[in-house]
Each structure stands twice: as structure tokens, then as C-alpha cells.
Image (cartoon, grey):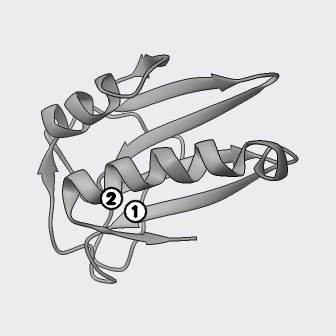
Amino acid sequence: MYDYISIRKDTNYSVSVPVKTIAKIAAAISDTEKVGNVSYAINLGEFRLLIKGILASPEGNYSYNSDEEFDEVNLVEIEIPQGSENIYEEQILRVAKIFAENLGWEIKE
């Protein structure tokens, strides 16, 4: 099971950014590994934090397992493995804040 942190501009997912922007932010975070078109992973001890750039509809709908080739994203989701949040809470929130601050978006836990 996973918990999620969503990072978006607003409840309507009204602002998109180029995939390249997400890649630059991810590259600036140490130990980040690219694992898909707009997917990145960070190993935290025995846990693996997954960061996904997503193109969501205005209602927030998207295909969960999709790592389609698209040019822009309007949602960043961080998948938090169950049990890791208590151990790595500071590191997880630091990653979320880096994305939110660089994009000027909000964090929704």
C-alpha cells in the first residue's frame, strides 16, 4: 500500500509545466534516479519513494499506471510506501517542498 502527496497549482489543475521542468527539479535532488518518462525514484533505506509527473484532467482524473509520452504535466504525485512516513517524514516533505517551491504550486497531503 501507498500513501500519496499531490503537488498541483490548484484544484482545477489549471497550470501545466513542460516535462523538462520536472526533470530539472528531480535532477537537483540528490540520489534521484529516472525510472520512466516522467517518473523518478529515491531510495530511502529499505523504502523506494516514487515521484511521478502526471497530466490530469480538470477534475484530477488520470490513468494511474500511465507513463505516456506527453510534453507537459499539471500534477506531481509522490508515492510514499506504507510504514516509511514515520521514519523518513522529514526527507519526504523536503522532496515535496522542493517541487512545490520550484513550481509555485501547493502541496495536498
Question: Is residue 48 among what the camera can see?
Answer: yes
Q: Which residue is mark 2?
A: 100
**Viewer-nearest of labels 1 and 2?**
2
Residue ID at (30%, 23%)? 27
The reply, left or right, for residue 46 in relation to residue 20 is right
> Label 2 neighbourhood size at 10 Å, few (<14), some (14-19), many (20+)?
some
For the point 36% across and 48% down, the residue is 98
Q: Residue 85 in the image: x percent, y percent?
A: 77, 51
Circle nearer the N terminus (1, 2): 1
As drawn, which residue projects farthest toward the right?
83
Disc 1 from disc 2: Cα separation: 6 Å
Q: Check disc 2 and report its element: helix, strand or loop.
A: helix
- Spot the residue most to the front: 90
Q: Is residue 63 visible?
A: no
Q: Name the image quarter holding the C terminus.
A: bottom right
Quarter assignment of residue 37: top left
Using the image as rendered, state which of residue 80 and residue 90 is in the foreground. 90
Q: How many neighbours does mark 1 have within 10 angstroms: few (below 14), some (14-19), or many (20 or more)?
A: many
Image x and y of residue 15, in percent: 15, 67
Answer with left or right where residue 88 lies relative to residue 75: right
How many callouts does the rendering have? 2
**In front of the other: 35 or 49:** 49
**Residue at coordinates 33% horizontally, 67% vertically from top-left?**
8
* Residue situated in front as seen by the camera: 83 or 17: 83
Residue lying at 21% horizontally and 56% vertically, measured from the top left: 103
- For badge 1, the amino acid type reads Ile
Query: What residue is disc 1 on?
Result: 7
Query: x and y percent of residue 79 in the render?
Result: 62, 46
